[in-house]
Amino acid sequence: MKIKTIASAILLLFVAVSAGYLIYKNAQGEPAPAPAQTVLREQAAPAQGRTLVVYFFHGRARCVSCKIIEALGQKALQAGFPEEMKSGRIVWRDIDLDKPENRHFIQEYRILSISLVLSDMENGEQKKWKNLEEVWTRLNDEKAFVEYVQKEIRAWL
């Protein structure tokens, strides 16, 4: 009986230390959100021609991961596609899914969590779209995250 008590105590201690370590590591490794002057503003997509809309879907309350996805998504666009952003060929859209008028996006893009979605628009009509689900697996590796988003965007241009 005493062995079970000791084993349980060791297991609880391990879980507590692991949880504390993860919280500490996440707090230490969190990239800072983009400075205010570099935050992309939502742009209106041109009605004519071809446009790639990069949607950032989130809720009203934003967790640490949400802020990282937003900051790194914007960084990927600013660093890799400044001319396309300036010309309107690529457009950033920040969408709060908690707003009733935006709820249709949840079913339209099959959104299960915070997401970056690419939408290829031609003359105001969506041709195809893709949810960049791998942003979650690259969340703690800024370089891999930015490279992944840029690679996906280049494949669509």
Image (tube, rainbow, N blue to C red):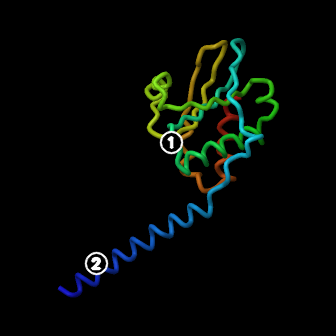
Say which residue appears at 77% left-offset and 42% top-offset. Answer: 79
Q: Secondary structure at mark 1?
A: loop
Q: Is residue 98 left or right of residue 34?
A: left
Q: Residues within 10 Å of mark 2 (few under 14, many from 20)?
A: few
Percent across and percent down for residue 110 are 45, 31
Percent across and percent down for residue 142 are 67, 53
Q: CA distance from mark 2 to mark 1?
A: 36 Å
Task: Name the mark nearer the viewer: 2 or 1.
Answer: 1
Q: Is residue 58 left or right of residue 28?
A: left
Q: Quadrant of the C terminus?
A: top right
Say which residue appears at 34% left-offset and 74% top-offset. Answer: 12
Q: Residues within 10 Å of mark 1 (few under 14, many from 20)?
A: few
Q: What kind of residue is marked 1?
A: Ala
Quarter of image, res 25:
bottom right
Q: Look at the picture and state if 66 lies above or below 126.
A: below
Say which residue appears at 69% left-offset and 53% top-offset. Answer: 143
Quarter of image, res 149:
top right
Question: Which numbered disc, 2 or 1, marks the residue that appears first in the sequence?
Answer: 2
Q: Are marks 2 and 1 in contact (CB under 8 Å)?
A: no
Residue located farthest toward the left when viewing the structure as drawn: 1
Percent across and percent down for residue 118 are 60, 31
Residue to which mark 1 is pinned: 61
Q: Look at the picture and state if 32 lies above or below 86.
A: below
Q: Quadrant of the N terminus?
A: bottom left
Percent across and percent down for residue 23 are 51, 64
Find residue 118 and name its label. Answer: none
The front one of 110 and 93 is 93
Q: How many numbered dots are placed on residues in this image?
A: 2
Q: Is residue 64 left or right of residue 33?
A: left
Q: What kind of residue is marked 2?
A: Ser
Residue to which mark 2 is pinned: 8
The front one of 41 and 73 is 41
